[in-house]
Structures are given as C-alpha cells and as structure tokens.
Amino acid sequence: MSSMNLIPVSTSDYRRLAKKRLPRNLFDYIDGGSYNETTLAANVQDFEKLRMKQSVLRDVENIDTTAQCLGETFSMPLGLAPIGLAGMMSRRAEVQAVKAAEKSGIPFCLSTVSICSLEEVAKAATKPFWFQLYMMRDRSYVKELLARAKAAGCKTLVFTVDLTVVGARYRDARNGMAGRLSTFAKFRAALEYPTHPKWLLDVAIKGKPHLFGNLEKLVPSARSLADFKDWVDSQFDPTCTWKDIEWLRSIWDGDLIIKGVLSPEDAKEAVASGADAIVVSNHGGRQLDGVSSSINMTPRIRDVVGDKTMIIMDGGVRSGQDIVKAVANGADFTLIGRAWIWALAARGQDGLEALLATFKSEMDVSMALTGVTNIANITSGVLDQY
Ligand SMILES: Cc1cc2nc3c(=O)[nH]c(=O)nc-3n(C[C@H](O)[C@H](O)[C@H](O)COP(=O)(O)O)c2cc1C
C-alpha cells in the first residue's frame, strides 16, 4: 500500500508516519538506541519470540482488562513512559499526552526533561499524573522540583536510575544531537526544516516556547541540544547510590517507583530500599547496549522479589499482545515509550487515543483466544511452553 493512503492502525504504521512528519534528527532521536542498538532490537525480538497458547470454548464473552497499580484502577495494565523532549515532536506534546492518557484510562508520566512544565501539564490534567526524576548534583534544585511536582498534584514519583551517565547514541552523534555540528552539518540540518512543513508549522512555529519547562532556570533553551547534552553530562549525578533513596524518601511522601532495574540483585536492593514498585527497564535500549531485553529479565526478577512487589516493565511493548505476554511473564503493569511518541508525532492526540484503543482491543482478543477473562488469570499458562 502506498504510504500516502495509509490509515494508521498499528504502532509500526504510526512509526512510518512519524518518520515522514519529523525532521530526521528528531525522528532518529526517538527511534534510535545506543551503540549498535542490539538491546533495542532484542527488546522487540524477544517479545516476538514468545508464543501464546490458543485455548478455545471457555466462555470469554466478558473480558475485563482493568488493572490495579499503586491503589488505582486503570483500563489496562499500561501507562505512558516518560519521554524527554516530547514537545519537540508534536505541539505541546506532554499536554496532548496527559489528555489522551486520561481519556483512555491509563497513567501518564511526565519527564524531568519535558518541554511542557509540571504546571502546564497540571492545568490540562483532571487527575494526578506521575512525575519522573533524574538525580541532579544540585540537590536543592531536586528538592524544589519535587515541591513543584507535589504542588502540581503528583502523587507518584518515578525515579530513573539508569542514566547516571549517558550511553552514546550514534544516530544522535551523526545528526549533531549529541555534540557540536560542523558548518556543513548545520546547513544540512537546516534543510530538514522546510522539507517537513507540517512539523514546521505545528511545532517550530505554533509549538513555542521550546524550553525545558521544569528546568528553565538551568537550561535556557531546548533548541541547542549540544548545550543540553553538556548540561546533562555535568549535572546528572553518577555518585548516586541506594542511600540516596533514603534521602528521596525523606523529601517525598508519595509513592516511589524505581525505574531502570534490570538485574535480580538490583531488584532485591530496590525492594529493600522501600520502593513501592520497580520498572524493569533498560531505558528502551538507549543506555547500556548489550544487556538483556526487559521481557527476558522480567520472570527472573519476579522470581526473586516474590508476589508482593509491583513489577512494571518497559522496552519493546508495541501491541496489546505484548502486554498480555508481559503479564504472563510476571509483570503487573507495562509502559510504552516510543509507541506513544510516534503516534503523537504522526497524528497528535487523536492518533494516540486511537493507538491506545487498538492496544485495548488487541488485549481483548488476545485474552479471549487464550481463554482468560481477567488480568489475574493471565499466568505463564497463556504462553506456549512446549
Ligand atoms: C525519545 C525517548 C526519550 C526518553 N526520555 C526519557 C526520560 O526523559 N526519562 C526516562 O526515565 N526515560 C526516558 N526514556 C525511556 C522511556 O521512559 C522508556 O523506558 C522506554 O522508551 C521504553 O522502551 P520502548 O520505547 O521500547 O517502549 C526515553 C525513551 C525515548 C525513546
């Protein structure tokens, strides 16, 4: 089918449309992973390798996909992962995303390095949303940020622990997103803008201001990504240890989720540190290339933490079938990163809502045909173990 006539249905359709809509450096920033992108590929391929077991004649008229997460009920075990710079992909993207998430009955997590500020998102939200934190050397700023998050109504803090140093992303380096550009590269990047007129109008012109809404005092503009990278390199704190969780606990009285746990040993530490939930994640294959996929690590982590700890997983979730597979592999809940920003970049809030409706109906069908009617019944038995 010609892509001109494409009616987007699946995540990969939205990816294709996002690729057309966005300047190359921005598309590559979303799409890419670190180094040779082997972990990025494994995240997706290891989901594809899992087979479900078809089970028939089990009265599956009433399918219930609702799931609990930290005391709240959501329409399915899925949330929108924090995505930095989302507002450069679609006009005020974080505001569109929180609205789409609320309409679809799922949680939205705002990144520390978002374009829209906590306050701008809070204005658009009618319920509490989640806030993601990167630990900065300037602890007084962290304290100030958490006070802002609380004032914005956030009750759940997602503390990301796998970006104390930044994995090299070759695509970003080639596009000048991760360093200084030569004059020729600057000229080539500038040519991308007029050749992507829809993005130019929607984001570059109507989507201002292009600031890091939560960091405007620290980083003056989101347009110089080289300056931003310098700031990240100097401010993100590699001295952080499990002890800092105690400090976080002393200044944050809401729920605390630790994101970026990938080994059983770290999962045990996270539980011991008092985390309310963990996110099994390798940052979507953007940090340490060569580590295992999140879906492969999920059952091993479930084995060591037991049933009481809430396990959220992300990395490679591209469909409702993947959500069922993740739950069957021991996850309680999942997050999507690229899928939501591709949909939003391609077709805005409507596109994201349509994609989330697709995920929900894919879950309905997958559950019906594996013979289960609610999330609690999705066990390893729905996977083909032969
Ligand atoms: C473009 C992009 C930006 C991201 N920014 C952040 C961020 O600011 N904070 C964070 O904790 N994780 C960030 N992540 C990681 C996601 O939250 C999530 O872990 C990952 O995207 C999941 O993999 P998936 O894209 O295959 O769904 C980012 C991921 C992408 C693709």
Image: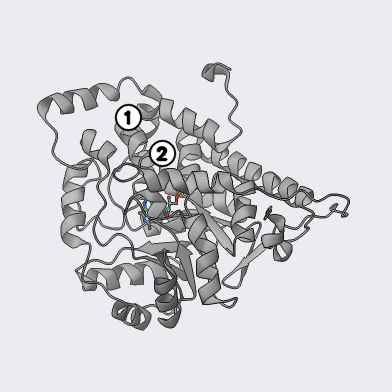
Amino acid at pointer 2: Arg
Q: Which residue is mark 1?
A: 24
Checking the image for residue 91, the label placed there is 2
Disc 2 element? loop
User: Would residue 174 appear left or right of 385 to someone viewing this image?
Assistant: left
Label 2 neighbour load within 10 Å: few <14, some 14-19, many 20+: many
Label 1 neighbour load within 10 Å: few <14, some 14-19, many 20+: some
Disc 1 element? helix
Viewer-proximal residue among 148 and 260:
260
Residue found at x 58% / y 78%: 308
Amino acid at pointer 1: Arg
- Above/below status of 352 relative to 25: below
User: Would residue 40 appear left or right of 125 to someone viewing this image?
Assistant: left
The tag earlier along the polypeptide, 2 or 1, is: 1
The quadrant of the image that shows the N terminus is top right
Picture coordinates of residue 64 (x, y %)? 75, 58
Residue found at x 54% / y 38%: 11
Picture coordinates of residue 200 (x, y %)? 34, 28
Viewer-proximal residue among 338 and 103:
338
Residue found at x 31% / y 58%: 214
Distance between the Cα atoms at labels 2 and 1? 17 Å
